[in-house]
Amino acid sequence: MKLWKKIDWLILLFLLAMFIVGIYIAPTMPDRVPTHWNIRGEVDGYGSKYINLFLMPSIALAAYLLMSFLPVIDPLRKNYEKFAKPYLYFKIFLAFFFIYLEIFLLYSSVRFSPPQGSLMFAIPFSLLLCFIGWILPQIKRNFFIGIRTPWSLVSDENWKKTHDFSGKVFIVAGIASLIASFFGSMASFIILIASVFTAVMATFVYSYLEYRKEKK
């Protein structure tokens, strides 16, 4: 699998440009900015402007580089070739997910009254769940990406069934969380956490039950 493509270099340059923008606008930013929202969507924590300027781009850059090099060290690296495009799409989506959060933080930093966090945070997280649900059935067996239960890692059949099932479950979780985001921060947070927990547990149990069937 080719490690770097042209689009990877473009994304890398874009992420590096975010740091340049941060350095450029730093003098115009307030020294004390909102950095944390509580379960009700209200700001309950303030910090240095450099947190909002550079934290999300740093996470985005680190995540993109890590995901780009994972295929090199995975013993099942050849399987990455079978889902190269979805893997690339996921890397790009994840990078822009963090960039969206960065834009929201910068917007909140210059507002006299910071916006509620429910719609701004819950919606991208819900879309991320749906995107994960879309990509899961396309992932082939590997040691880093996907639903890595003890039973899916040792069986291609269990891996496929588990990921086909988990893809549907995560899409449902994302849709449920997306709908809840329009009913207030409290409901949004509870449904988001409950949806993720339910999706993970359901997938884990399903993988084990499929293993029991294979064993019989």
Image (tube, grey):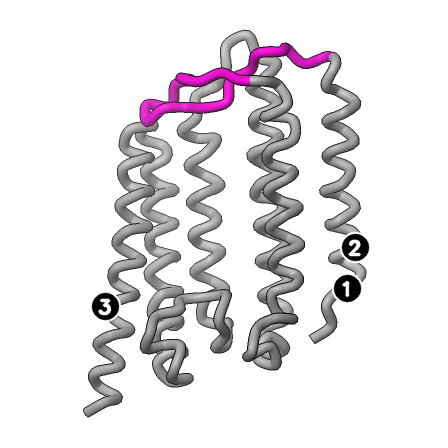
Question: Considering only vertical position in the picture, is 205 above or below 37?
Answer: below
Q: Dot 2 corresponds to which residue?
A: 9
* In magenta segment, residue 32: yes
Give the side of residue 186 with respect to residue 50, left or right.
left
The quadrant in which the C terminus is found is: bottom left
**Residue at the spot 79% in from the left edge and 55% down from the top edge:** 9
Q: Quadrant of residue 122?
A: top left
- Taking depth in this image into account, of 121 and 35 the one nearest to the observer is 35
Question: Separation of disc 1 and disc 2 at Cα?
Answer: 7 Å
First to last magenta residue range: 28-47
Q: Dot 1 corresponds to which residue?
A: 5
Give the side of residue 8 with respect to residue 145, left or right.
right
Q: Position of residue 96 (x, y in %)?
A: 62, 44
Q: Position of residue 209 (x, y in %)?
A: 21, 76
Q: Position of residue 171 (x, y in %)?
A: 39, 57
Question: Considering only vertical position in the picture, is 89 above or below 195?
Answer: below
Q: Dot 3 corresponds to which residue?
A: 205
Q: Earlier in the sequence, mark 2 or mark 3?
A: 2
